[in-house]
Every structure is written in structure tokens, then in C-alpha cells.
Amino acid sequence: MTEDRQWTAFLQWALPQLRMRWSGFRKVRAQVRKRVHKRMQSLQLVGLNDYRDYLQHHPQEWRVLDTLCRITISRFYRDKGVFRLLAGRIIPGLVEQVRRDGNSRMDIWSVGCGSGEEPYSLAILWAVQLQQRFPDITLRILATDVDPQLLNRARTACYPFSSLKELPVFLRESAFTVSAGRYCLQPAFKRAVLFVEHDVRGPVPATALQLILCRNLVYTYYDEGLQRGITQRLVDALQPGGLLVVGSHETLPGDVPGFMPLSCNRAIYKKT
């Protein structure tokens, strides 16, 4: 058996025990493989069979493996079409709903925010393109991730250009200053975002939300049973008429009530 097939066989064995799906890891398995190999070296284990035995005799190691399977691919304005739709139609529509409800704040949750690229994209979009149109509305973005190191990077908010290459130039020039070859977000654009350590597999950290972005995480990497449980909690976290945005290649489990896809984009669901 080739080395790649050995790693594939290991992941196909291990991932279901973590309630994860092998299909979600096909293209990113090298990232997991590198981390697991480093972990094996630290344990002085020679091969995958040794690590498999170690897992079976040390149940606490599964928690470590769970952390090694976190995928951290992220960038600003990922899926440009979604952000164009958010700016042009979705967020303005939600603002009107907030006004009808007699409120002055729109609450958004960015799930699995990584190093902050997604919530900061929303904050920049709001400040540059929308805030002048809706001066009576304030924006609060709750940004959560299970990895404290990523959250620390998000709070620092300095990025290489590769993280910003999809962000429209006028937004990049409005929101960032360049320092030592890195693009650092100006403090004014950080104020709307609150970073909190949180595992999406647990209870929701907020309710009465107008918008949840849960992209390229739950519906890519977790098994269907876990997806169903998380989806029901996301339904409960949204206000009536609130919206859920998933990844452009993701879909919700078919047997979870409470959401209907919007005709304008199949990656956006409305709470019924």
C-alpha cells in the first residue's frame, strides 16, 4: 500500500469516530496529514498503525486528533458573489426588518471565523458601503472559533496580501494600512466585531440574530447527524425571517425543518 493510501485509510477510519466526513477532507488531507505526522513524532511513534494503537489505548488522544483536523483556509471576501448579494440585497432587507421590529441594532454571527477574515469583510462592507444609508442602525458581529490562536491573530488583524487578494481594491484601500509588507486593519473597522472562543458543536452563544454565516465548516466536515443537531440550534438562534448563509457548495440536511432556500441564491436560507 502506498503512503498516500495508508493515510487515506487512516483518515477513513478515524474521522467517523470524530463525527467527521472523509469526503470533506479529500482536498485538504495534506494539512491534516502534516499535523498528525508532527504529533506522531512528538509521541515517538513510527507509523500510522502505532498511532492507531495509541488512540485505542489512550482515549484522551482523540481530543488531540480533533484539534489536528481543524481546517483553517480563509480569506477576505471569499465567494465574491455572496458578499455582493449581502451588500446589494440581503443586509438592506434585514435592516428594514430590524426597523419594523422597532430595533436599532442588527446582530450577525460569523461561525468558525478563523483569523477574522469573514467578520471583518462584513464590518468593512457595512462601514464603507452601507452605514451612510442606514445611520440609525448599528451593527454587531459576533465572531466565534474553537481555536484560541486563530482568535488572537484575528484580534491583531494584520494579514499578508494573499489573504486580501479577493477583496475589492476600494475596500482594501479604505480599511487597511500597510506595515512591513502586511495589511493591518484600521481600528475603526474592528469595533463592530466581538471575538469569542466557541465550538459550534455546543450550545449557541447568542439568540435573536438576524443573520448567521456558517460557511465551509459544518456542512463540509461534519457527519449528517451532527449537521442536523447544529442546524436545529441555528434555527433557534435566529429571529423569525432571519437568514443563514452556508458555503457555495454546501447544502443543509434535507430532514431539518425551519429553513427554506432563497431563490436568489441556494447558499442562503430563510427561517420560516
Image (cartoon, rainbow, N blue to C red):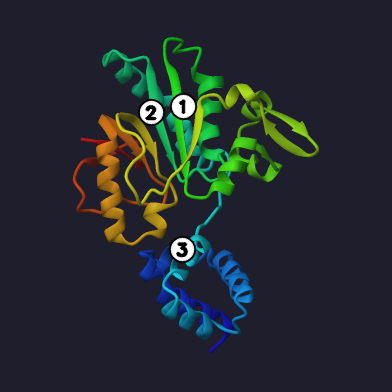
Q: Which mark is residue 90?
A: 2
Q: Are marks 1 and 2 in contact (CB under 8 Å)?
A: yes
The secondary element bearing badge 2 is classed as helix
Foreground of the two, 32 or 241:
32
Name the residue carrying label 3: 66
Dot 1 alpha-carbon crowd within 10 angstroms: few under 14, some 14 to 19, many 20 or more: some
Task: Work out whether 61 lies above or below 247.
Answer: below
Task: Work out whether 21 lies above or below 118.
Answer: below
Instruction: Residue 129: give x, y in percent of width and height.
Output: 53, 20
From the viewer's perspective, tell me whether residue 194 is left or right of residue 170.
Answer: left
Task: Work out whether 241 lies above or below 8.
Answer: above
The amino acid pointed to by label 2 is Ile
Distance Cα–Cα, label 1 vs label 2? 7 Å
- Depth check, mark 2 against mark 3: the one in front is 3
The image quadrant of residue 77 is top right
Sequence order check: which comes first, mark 2 or mark 3?
Answer: 3
The image quadrant of residue 30 is bottom right
Name the residue carrying label 1: 87
Dot 2 alpha-carbon crowd within 10 angstroms: few under 14, some 14 to 19, many 20 or more: some
Foreground of the two, 117 or 54:
54
The amino acid pointed to by label 1 is Ala
The secondary element bearing badge 3 is classed as helix
Instruction: Residue 192: give x, y in percent of width and height.
Output: 51, 25
